[in-house]
Image (cartoon, grey):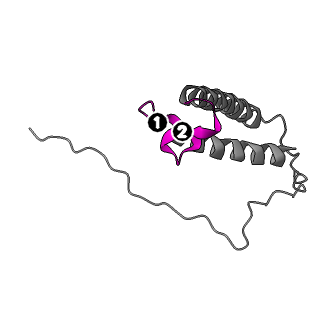
Amino acid sequence: MYETLKIIWSIVAICLVVLILLHSPKSDGLGGFSGQAQLFSSTKSAETALNRVTWFLTAAFLGLTVVLSGGWFTTPTVTAPPPAQVAPATNAVPNSQPIPLNLPATTPEQPQQ
């Protein structure tokens, strides 16, 4: 189900990009794209239909984005079993000797008068 929604989301995104590119900054509409406006009775109806489809796909894209990011349809992940308990290592190291720290004690020097 999750993979199907991702595919639908991708198709909606591509269609949305194409429809947005079909919009003309001037009032040409679909007429600027190889005469596609002849499918409709007028340029105004073509722009109206293009706007409605664009808004519908925008709502579908945003809705699918929320559903996919919500994690409601994710596939269950297989978790690894917890690691086996291991006995802690001992601190004893064979043949270890403490390091003697025979440092001379330092005393502050007394100022002579």
Nearest to the observer: residue 87 or residue 22: 22
Nearest to the observer: residue 7 or residue 69: 7
Q: Earlier in the sequence, mark 1 or mark 2?
A: 1
Q: Does residue 81 sit above or below 16 in this rendering?
A: below
**Three-letter amino acid code at the position of disc 2:** Leu
Asked if labels 2 and 1 touch by Cβ distance under 8 angstroms, the answer is: yes
- Which residue is under mark 2? 30
Q: Which of the labelled discs sits on residue 24, or is there none?
A: 1
Nearest to the observer: residue 35 or residue 83: 35
- Residue 104 in percent (x, y) is at 38, 57
What is the span of residues highlighted in magenta in the rendered image?
A: 24-42
Q: Residue at x 20, y 41 (%)?
A: 110
- Residue 96 in percent (x, y) is at 67, 70
**Three-letter amino acid code at the position of disc 1:** Ser
Q: Is residue 21 left or right of residue 60?
A: left
Q: Quadrant of residue 72?
A: top right
Tell me the SS state at disc 2. helix
Q: Is residue 31 magenta?
A: yes
